[in-house]
Image: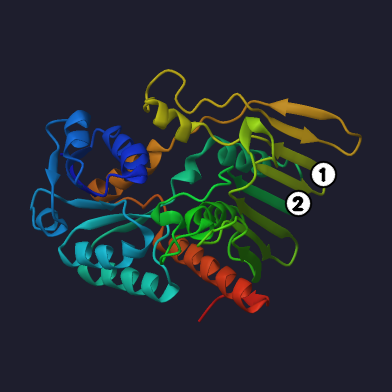
Amino acid sequence: MTIGVGLIGYGMAGRVFHAPLIRAVPALRLAAIVTSRAADVATLDPAIACVARVGDLLADPAIDLVVLATPSGTHASLCADALRAGKHVVVDKPFALSLADARDLAALAARVGRRLAVFHNRRFDSDYLSIRAAIEGGAVGRVTHFESHFDRFRPAVRDRWREDGSAGSGVWFDLGPHLVDQALALFGQPDAVSADIVALRGGSMADDWAHVVLRYADKRVVLHASLTAPGGEAGGAPRFVVHGTQGTIIKRRLDPQEAQLIAGLRPGDAGWGADDDPVERWDDAGIVTRHRAETGCQQRFYAAVAHALLADGPLPVPTDDAMMVQAVIEAALLSARDGRVVALPLH
């Protein structure tokens, strides 16, 4: 049995991430895409229907799972429409623009008996998997300081919805959910959040710099995103730095899967997810040992979704986890706006 999948949106997220990762899972059949880019859909696969209207896709009984790869400000309304149409839903991050909307969607999914997952694909990145394995293996002892950077170098403001100041635009809604989800998957809900989120580039209509601290009783977790910092092999801050009671671990470069997908590589191809940037472990004598990075495997997100629908298995990102991410995203926005520390949980 295969699951019929309808993808809404065929921009960067739909074309680069969702379509290839869905098509990498045999139990999923990408049957239709809602987009005006009919030629691009035909190039991908002429058997995939190009649908002009969301309503037509939602009315199609052959579509079991709807995937939302649309601008962030549309997620809540489209997700609600899909759930009411009897479809299971995967929604790209951010889940919604408010915790209240996220709670409403989770409640709606429960009422209609449909599965709802948020696309936190970077739980399956090589850099994160490597750091997680090192921490769980005791490489640093008890973690006291965890720092996660998602930096890009885009000093000129571009004409696109992610930067135009509209609802859901800005680096915190774009990259923040990745940073938050990874941190919470490691350490759970923090006690409080403090944040500075601003626009630093000339002419920027949306935030392009975010520095957020998650406060735990025994550690601090620093999450940083910027559009004016060269990253990866170009330099800049390491992707992860983790200090603990028995040493430090550093992962310098970002997982390669996004670049591989853009270049046309697909899951199963030679070298897929392979990361040649090792994890460094430093001790108090300055001695460094290097360990091979884990292999990235973002296709596991959709493999887990298929298993959840066909065998009533767990979702790759439980709804409670997605709600916690949304709460931290909102707490950071409140902290930056009001200049205060915001306690969790939010009520």
Snapshot quadrant of residue 116: bottom left
The answer to which of marks 1 and 2 sits earlier in the sequence is 2
Is residue 294 found left or right of 75 in the rendered image? right
Q: Pointers 1 and 2 in contact (CB under 8 A)?
A: yes
Question: Above or below — where is 30 with respect to 89?
Answer: above
Residue 205 appears at what percent x and percent y? 50, 62
Tell me where residue 99 appears, x and y as whole percent.
44, 73
Q: Secondary structure at mark 2?
A: loop
Amino acid type indicated by mark 1: Gln
Residue 332, picture quadrant: bottom right
Of all residues, the one furthest to the top in this rendering is 270
Q: Is residue 291 left or right of residue 153?
A: right
**Which residue: 27% across, 56% down?**
89
Q: Quadrant of the N terminus?
A: top left
Q: Residues within 10 Å of mark 2 (few under 14, many from 20)?
A: some
Where is residue 115? Give x, y as percent: 28, 59
CA–CA distance between discs 1 and 2? Answer: 7 Å
Residue pointed to by mark 1: 246
**Which one is in front, 191 or 169?**
169
* Colouring used for the render: rainbow
Q: Residue at x 47, y 31 (%)?
A: 259
* Residue 139 coordinates in the image, percent (x, y): 74, 39
Whether residue 2 appears in this view of the structure is no
Give the residue at x 81% y 35%. Answer: 282
Q: Viewer-proximal residue, 327 or 165? A: 165
Would you name the residue on which mark 2 appears?
A: 142
* Residue at the right extreme, as displayed: 285
Front one among 340 and 21: 340
Residue at 52%, 70% (x, y): give it. 330
The residue lying furthest to the bottom in this view is: 347
Q: Which residue is most to the front?
A: 203
Label 1 Cα crowd, 10 Å radius (few <14 / some 14-19 / many 20+): some
